[in-house]
Image (cartoon, helix red, strand yellow):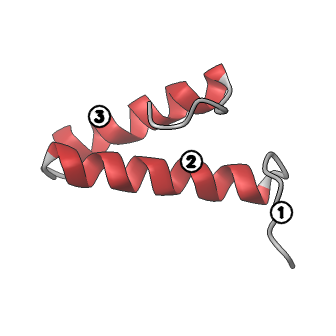
Amino acid sequence: MPEKEWSPKRERQYEHIKKSEMEKEGRPEETAKRIAAATVNKTRKEKGETKEQKKK
């Protein structure tokens, strides 16, 4: 879990995406970690959970 400020929900989301990328998509672990972290951070930004919220 790369981010200390992630909520438990986002931690679970990260682990789920990482596992899915590795098992279903056959990606290396490092690639899966980057994809999972980027996805969680994008979701957090869209949901207003960050200091910088996505501008519409």
Question: Residue type at mark 1?
Answer: Gln
Give the image location of residue 19, x and y in percent: 29, 34
Give the image location of residue 41, x and y in percent: 60, 52
Q: Give the vertical position of 15 relative to 27 (above or below).
A: above
Give the image location of residue 35, x and y in percent: 37, 55
Label ID, residue 19: 3
Q: What is the C-alpha distance between the residues marked 1 and 3?
A: 27 Å
Q: What is the C-alpha distance between the residues marked 3 and 2?
A: 14 Å
**Residue at (40% x, 41% y) in the render:** 17
Label 1: state its secondary structure.
Answer: loop
Q: Which of 50 and 25 is in front in this view?
A: 50
Q: In this view, does 22 lie to the left or right of 54?
A: left
**Residue at (85% x, 76% y) in the render:** 55
User: Of label 1 and label 2, which has the lower sequence position?
Assistant: 2
Label 3: state its secondary structure.
Answer: helix
Estimate how packed mark 1 is, as few (under 14), some (14 to 19) or many (20 or more) residues with alpha carbons within 10 Å.
few
Label 2: state its secondary structure.
Answer: helix
Question: Residue type at mark 2?
Answer: Val
Residue 24 appears in the figure? no
Q: In this view, does 56 lie to the left or right of 45?
A: right
Q: Nearer the viewer, residue 1 or 26?
A: 1
| Marks 1 and 2 close (CB-CB < 8 Å) | no
| Marks 1 and 3 close (CB-CB < 8 Å) | no
Q: Mark 2 points at which residue?
A: 40
**Quarter of the image where the N terminus is located:** top left
Estimate how packed mark 2 is, as few (under 14), some (14 to 19) or many (20 or more) residues with alpha carbons within 10 Å.
many
Q: Nearer the viewer, residue 17 or 30?
A: 30
Give the image location of residue 4, x and y in percent: 59, 29
Label ID, residue 53: 1
